[in-house]
Image: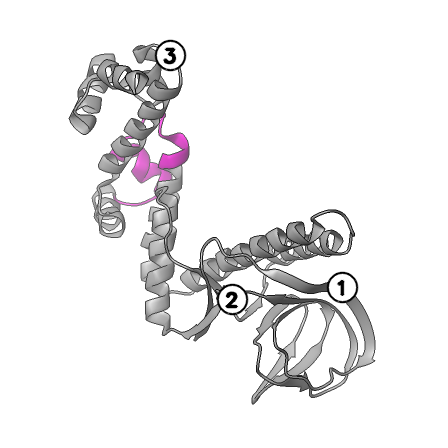
């Protein structure tokens, strides 16, 4: 499978960004010196890219590469679409087998859910079909905004459009990742997606009481089994990860506010101030009071 890679913190330069509706039209032959992206809003488009023939329908996204000839191979009776011409030096193309790709996407997902900074490139599909109505509408909204920005003739509107195009690339990357991971073997998907949901639950509700019984009830699974899967995917047990999240939040509260230690403990899920202090010191080497003092002194 061919995937486009975009390096982090790189920025596209847009040369054209438009929305058109055509009747009985066929694309002329050309070999572009820039990237060209199409998104089909309605109708059909028929494109040949070198020796590959694409029949594009509503909800399809395609990225055509510079230096490769393309043309229409059949008349499009009625077609409404966006087209974007742009340059992006950091965009490269790579062939990756599906197993390797699944591994990369799963690691990225796990790192993101655990709040880790991703260092890998943005992975962008060269062709994507927005199967759900929500995916279609979100892409369409982003493209409409980009079209308005690029053609508004206001100061720095080209930069606004370029930022939005990068946003669209990241959104397409999210959609592609979800689609690829969902299509994995069902036995793997069930346990992996429980881990995804559990990570989200801990990150959003770390202040609530967590027990093995609650986890079993909420996620309809055996606790020992999902704890093993969780450790395999993240490198930590469920409660070890929960403790890390709570202590991280406590450090933020101690460093940025004047809340009493008791209130800090309660806000991160500990009712017992003494237990909280012991856990905090075990993880940081300092008591909460010592940690706050160190931060203030520095």
Residue 221 painted magenta: yes
| Mark 2 or mark 1, whichever is nearer to me | 2
Q: Are there few (<14), some (14-19), or many (20+) residues within 10 Å of tag 2? A: few
Q: Which mark is residue 259?
A: 3
| Residue at 32%, 53% in the rendered image | 191
Q: Secondary structure at mark 1?
A: strand
Report helix, strand or loop for mark 2. Answer: loop
Give the image location of residue 147, x and y in percent: 73, 57
Q: Quadrant of residue 113?
A: top left
User: As rendered, which of 291 and 237 lies closer to the eye?
Assistant: 291
Left or right of 41? Residue 180 is left
- Mark 2–mark 1 contact, CB under 8 Å? no
Relative image position of residue 63 (x, y in whole percent): 58, 71
Mark 2 or mark 3, which is nearer to you? 2
- Using the numbered discs, state the Cα–Cα distance from disc 2 to disc 3 in whole angstroms: 49 Å
Q: Earlier in the sequence, mark 3 or mark 1?
A: 1
Read off the magenta span.
Answer: 202-222
Q: Quadrant of residue 24?
A: bottom right
Q: Residue 257, how many percent across, how many down?
A: 40, 16
Q: Residue at x 64, y 51 (%)?
A: 159
What is the quadrant of the N terminus in the image? bottom left
> Front-most of 167 and 106?
167
- Residue plotted at (49% across, 67% down): 91
Residue that badge 2 annotates: 89
- One can see residue 227 in this view: yes
């Amino acid at each position: 499978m061919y995937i486009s890679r975009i390096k982090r913190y790189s920025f596209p330069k847009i040369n054209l960004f438009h929305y058109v509706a055509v009747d009985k039209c066929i694309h002329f032959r050309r070999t572009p010196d820039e990237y060209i992206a199409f998104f089909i809003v309605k109708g059909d488009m028929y494109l040949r890219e070198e020796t590959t023939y694409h029949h594009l329908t509503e909800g399809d996204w395609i990225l055509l590469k510079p230096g490769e000839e393309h043309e229409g191979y059949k008349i499009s009776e009625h077609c409404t679409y966006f087209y974007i011409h742009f340059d992006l030096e950091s965009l490269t193309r790579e062939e990756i087998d599906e197993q390797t790709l699944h591994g990369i996407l799963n690691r990225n997902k796990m790192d993101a859910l655990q709040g880790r900074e991703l260092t890998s490139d943005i992975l962008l599909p060269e062709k994507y079909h927005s199967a759900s109505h929500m995916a279609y509408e979100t892409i369409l909204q982003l493209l409409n905004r980009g079209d308005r920005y690029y053609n508004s003739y206001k100061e720095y509107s080209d930069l606004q459009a370029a930022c939005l195009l990068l946003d669209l690339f990241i959104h397409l990357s999210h959609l592609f990742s979800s689609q690829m991971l969902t299509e994995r073997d069902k036995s793997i998907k069930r346990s992996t997606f429980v881990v995804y949901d559990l990570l989200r639950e801990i990150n959003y509700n770390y202040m609530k009481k967590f027990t093995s019984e609650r986890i079993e009830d909420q996620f309809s699974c055996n606790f020992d089994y999902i704890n093993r899967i969780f450790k395999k995917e993240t490198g930590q047990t469920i409660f070890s990860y929960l403790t890390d999240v709570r202590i991280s939040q406590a450090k933020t509260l101690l460093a940025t506010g004047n809340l009493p230690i008791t209130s800090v403990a309660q806000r991160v899920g500990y009712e017992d101030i003494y237990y909280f202090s012991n856990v905090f010191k075990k993880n940081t080497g300092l008591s909460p009071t010592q940690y706050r003092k160190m931060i203030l002194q520095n």
